[in-house]
Image: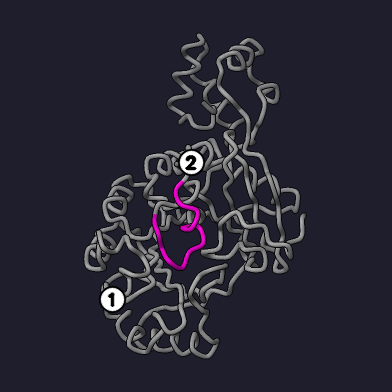
Amino acid sequence: MNVRDLRHSELERLVEETGEPRFRADQLFRWIHARGATSWDEMTDLPARLRARLAASGLSLAPLAIDLLQRSADGTRKLRLRTHDGRLIESVLIPEPDKLTLCVSSQVGCALDCTFCATAKLGFGRQLSPGEIVDQVYRARELAQKDGSRISNLVFMGMGEPLHNLKNVLCALEMLTHELGAAFSHRRITVSTAGLVPGIERLGQADLRVGLAISLNATTDALRDQLMPINRKWNLAALLGAVRRYPLERRRRVTFEYVLLAGQNDTDADAVRLPKLLRGIPAKVNLIPWNPHPGAPFARPAPERILAFQDKLQAGGLSAFVRRPRGDDIAAACGQLANQVVPLGRLQ
């Protein structure tokens, strides 16, 4: 077991079992989660006897290994990380003028089969542990600090379906927002889902107050059944019902991600239906022009079609934004994460 998998309360029990006072757990948690320690020897304010016991306990402090780092022409960086058992996952650092966002993975591969997503082609490998989830943040944090920058936002939109791994994601969120650790604001964390209704309800009940994003991508059940097979289990009515029940803080909105596929879901009729579907939900829509990957039978709409779709949504009363692809030259953009090494990517 990696020590990063342990909650603060579990660290308290661990140090008490060694005969140490409980405040040692605070020190240990700070070293692991605030400072990103990767060895027991770094923890210089802990007694040598405690460090020796921890080292002998079998608990690991080994971090995720950076297997490959690629930098896009637009400054986006993709980290391919290797787990202790040799699995590969990807995280993406996305710079913007006023923030630095890290896109975090929750699984090795993905069990869902969304037809437009490259990660789906990998199939499902395994769940990531809480420690593997948070360590993506800490490895990326080290890179950002070398540039004199700081990660400001976290989005659980990387490889995998976060709500399929909800137990470990909730544990990771607790660690990431803990005041003794990385201390991220819950208002700067968003969890995305393809539409697992029970998971949405459990996430709301957890009272972590993180943002919710829904990968929607269709305005009819018939099309969504084709694009996102999860819709056959929880259709649009069930999904949007769960979203309406999700506890939102004042002035927060649910983000609806809508990947635009030429000739599929970008028609005028879709643009008319979407505001009606979301009526009554504090919402914003992110329009994401589809990012190509090998073997997929889709195309990105023409720029004028994208803008016309956005105009119709706004005329229908929806806040709609077109998201410029980031990192698509290194297969780091939305829907492209599949451990693919793009020759054009420059090692950095």
x, y percent for residue 162: 42, 50
User: Which residue lies under the disc numbered 2?
Assistant: 128
For the residue labelled by badge 1, is the local secondary structure a helix, a strand or a loop?
loop
Q: How many marks?
A: 2
Residue at x 64%, y 43% (from the top left corner):
139
**Label 1 vs 2, first from the N-terminus:** 2
Residue at x 39%, y 88% (from the top left corner):
312
Question: Mark 1 touching mark 2, by CB under 8 A?
Answer: no
x, y percent for residue 175: 48, 38
User: Which residue lies under the disc numbered 1?
Assistant: 220
Taking the image as shown, residue 178 lies to the left or right of residue 165, namely right
User: Which amino acid is tagged 2?
Assistant: Leu
x, y percent for residue 306: 49, 85
Could you classify mark 1 by the number of other residues whose Cα lies within 10 Å: few (under 14), some (14-19), or many (20 or more)? some
Report the Cα–Cα distance between label 1 and label 2: 33 Å
Vertical arrangement, residue 82 with respect to residue 234, above or below = above
Along the viewing direction, whichever of 139 and 347 lies nearer the viewer? 347
Q: Which residues are magenta?
A: 112-124
User: Which amino acid is tagged 1?
Assistant: Thr
Query: Is residue 86 located in the magenta-colored stretch of the structure?
Result: no
Residue at x 57%, y 36% (from the top left corner):
33
Q: Main secondary structure of the magenta part?
A: loop
